[in-house]
Amino acid sequence: MANVVKRSVDIRYGQEGPRHDPYGYVEYEIYQEFDTVPPVFITVHIGLVEYAEINGRRVDIDSDSFSCIATMDVRTFCSLVERAKARRITVCRKCGSRKLEQARGYPGEIIVYCSECGSVCDSEISYMDM
């Protein structure tokens, strides 16, 4: 069994479609290096078009090949990437406190704030909650 030696996650937001009627999209990315097998780079694009890319090869989101390589379905994959990304901010930039809380803002918005000083440390749109 291969052990993960390096992992990075990222979430990117953007717009696609015509300029007069753009659509928002979100891309969930994970890169993993292993000790005994080649690295894996997975991107899931959810927007006007929904697809996944595994090491540059496009696969259908609902296909067995995605579940086989990623070892989970797409919904679980996106949820894990969002949770890993949300954990990155651990200290309030204003007061240095580690007492951060999450709250919901507008529909689909997640706000990370400091419970000590009340400042907003981060906010993110979660398309999985909409």
Image: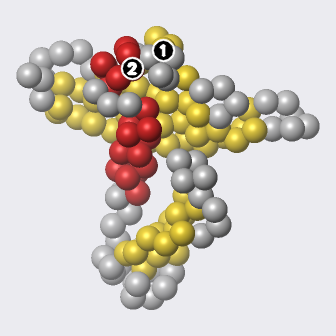
For mark 1, give the secondary structure. strand
Q: Residue at x 39, y 20 (%)?
A: 66
- Extreme right residue here? 20
The numbered dot on residue 66 is 2
- Between discs 1 and 2, the one toward the N terminus: 1
Q: Position of residue 15 (x, y in %)?
A: 72, 38
Tell me, yes or no, if residue 92 can be seen here: no
Q: Nearer the viewer, residue 116 or 66?
A: 66
Residue at figure coordinates x 37%, y 75% from the top left: 100
21 shown above or below 119? above
Color scheme of the displayed model: secondary structure
Left or right of residue 55, residue 22 in this image: right
Residue found at the very far left of the displayed protein = 1
Which residue, as the protein is rendered here, is positioned at the far bottom? 117
Q: From mark 1 to mark 2, how far is it between C-alphas?
A: 7 Å
- Image coordinates of residue 16 in percent, x first then y, are 74, 32
73 lies left or right of 50: left
Q: Is residue 85 left or right of residue 51?
A: left
Find disc 1 in the rendering and name its residue: 59
SS at circle 2: helix
Query: Dot 2, crowdedness within 10 Å: few (<14), some or many (≥20)?
Result: many
Q: Amino acid at mark 2?
A: Phe
Q: Contact, CB < 8 Å: mark 1 with mark 2?
A: yes
Task: Please determine whether, in this image, residue 119 is positioned above or below residue 45.
Answer: below
